[in-house]
Image (cartoon, rainbow, N blue to C red):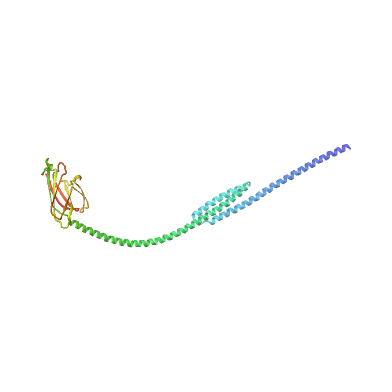
């Protein structure tokens, strides 16, 4: 009986162990199945969310392209901006597609899609702003064109008036020039008529002795100064007063003998319309009378040259008389 009881107890123990083992195994299998079910549910959920995001991405991308295309056609500048923004959207979509393929970056993919949506809104707002600016500029351009046409018409009218005025001005200018020319001709005639003629010029070559007395000489090597006398004629047209007589002595080679320290200079010739060098200028208080005006010209040259000398006297810019002398 004792042996039988012992066997029964061993069997009970073994059965308990087997049952316990089976219970543990069943628990493990149940837990493992639960975990697998959770993983499968999670993967299914991710796949579903991924598919949803892909569909949403495609929809969002094409809607963005359509929205941008609707803004096309206002100007080449805006069209170029739209093309650039479409390329940026394409790059953004490629980036999101990569995150969705990974499956582990759904959060980043969702954030990038939100960024893309914000980016599209920014693009549209920018283009709308540029369109408004272009419309404003187009309006200003039209206004400027209208003003330009108005100004052009006014300018044409003003040009016609100016042309008429220019014609009148030219006519008046021509009449004024004629009057001026006539006035100048009359003034020249009066000036020429008032020139005091010189009908005689006498030149006496002299030599100054050590005593200070001068003697007449005829050889060039002995002459050191000249006594020049000019004889004026009566001229009732010339006004009484101081007259200037410009005396010009030309040496045998035709050069004007002129020394600035002895009163040489230039005067304007009305006959040749140029400046002429003179030897000496003599002032005289003329009273419409005929008289001799004499002066000594002492160049202190040491010696004159041999030959024929010419003397010219000018008054009021005109040649009043000529003379000459010889030195042996």
Q: Is residue 184 left or right of residue 26?
A: left
* Horizontal and vertical percent position of residue 138: 47, 58
The spot of residue 172 in percent (x, y) is 28, 61
Q: Nearer the viewer, residue 19 or 159?
A: 159
Q: Residue furthest top?
A: 3
Looking at the image, residue 219 sits to the left or right of residue 275; the answer is left
Which of 231/100 is in front? Answer: 231
- Viewer-nearest residue: 233 or 283: 283
Is 250 in front, or is 296?
296
x, y percent for residue 164:
33, 62
Above or below, comparing residue 323 to residue 3 in the picture: below
Count of residue discs: 0
Q: Which residue is drawn at 57% across and 49% down?
A: 92
Q: Give the x, y percent position of residue 213.
A: 11, 43
Q: Which quadrant holds the C terminus?
A: top left
Quadrant in the picture for the N terminus: top right
Where residue 327 sits, quadrant-wise, is top left
- Going by the image, does 209 lie left or right of 61? left
- What residue is rendered at 25% in x and 60% in y? 179
**In the image, what residue occupies the spot 83% across and 40% down?**
12
Residue drawn where x is 81% and y is 41% of the image: 16
């Amino acid at each position: 009986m004792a042996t039988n009881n012992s066997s029964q107890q061993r069997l009970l123990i073994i059965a308990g162990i087997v049952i316990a083992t089976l219970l543990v195994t069943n628990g493990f299998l149940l837990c493992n199945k639960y975990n697998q079910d959770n993983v499968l549910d999670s993967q299914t959920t991710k796949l579903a969310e991924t598919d949803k995001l892909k569909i949403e991405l495609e929809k969002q991308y094409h809607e963005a392209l359509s929205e941008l295309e609707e803004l096309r056609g206002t100007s080449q500048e805006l069209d170029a901006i739209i093309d650039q923004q479409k390329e940026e959207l394409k790059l953004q979509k490629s980036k999101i597609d990569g995150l969705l393929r990974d499956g582990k970056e759904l959060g980043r993919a969702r954030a990038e899609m939100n960024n893309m949506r914000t980016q599209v809104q920014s693009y549209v707002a920018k283009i709308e702003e540029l369109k408004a600016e272009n419309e404003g500029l187009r309006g200003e351009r039209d206004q400027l064109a209208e003003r330009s046409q108005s100004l052009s018409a006014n300018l044409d009218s003003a040009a016609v008036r100016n042309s008429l005025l220019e014609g009148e001005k030219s006519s008046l200018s021509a009449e004024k020039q004629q009057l001026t020319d006539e006035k100048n001709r009359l003034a020249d005639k009066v000036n020429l008529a008032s020139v005091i003629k010189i009908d005689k010029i006498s030149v006496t070559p002299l030599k100054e002795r050590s005593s200070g007395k001068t003697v007449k000489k005829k050889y060039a090597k002995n002459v050191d100064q000249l006594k020049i006398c000019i004889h004026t004629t009566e001229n009732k047209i010339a006004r009484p007063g101081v007259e200037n007589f410009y005396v010009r002595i030309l040496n045998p080679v035709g050069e004007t003998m002129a020394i600035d320290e002895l009163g040489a200079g230039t005067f304007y010739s009305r006959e040749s319309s140029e400046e002429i060098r003179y030897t000496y200028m003599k002032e005289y208080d003329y009273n419409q009378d005929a008289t001799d005006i004499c002066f000594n010209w002492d160049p202190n040259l040491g010696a004159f040259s041999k030959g024929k000398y010419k003397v010219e006297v000018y008054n009021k810019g005109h040649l009043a008389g000529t003379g000459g002398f010889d030195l042996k």
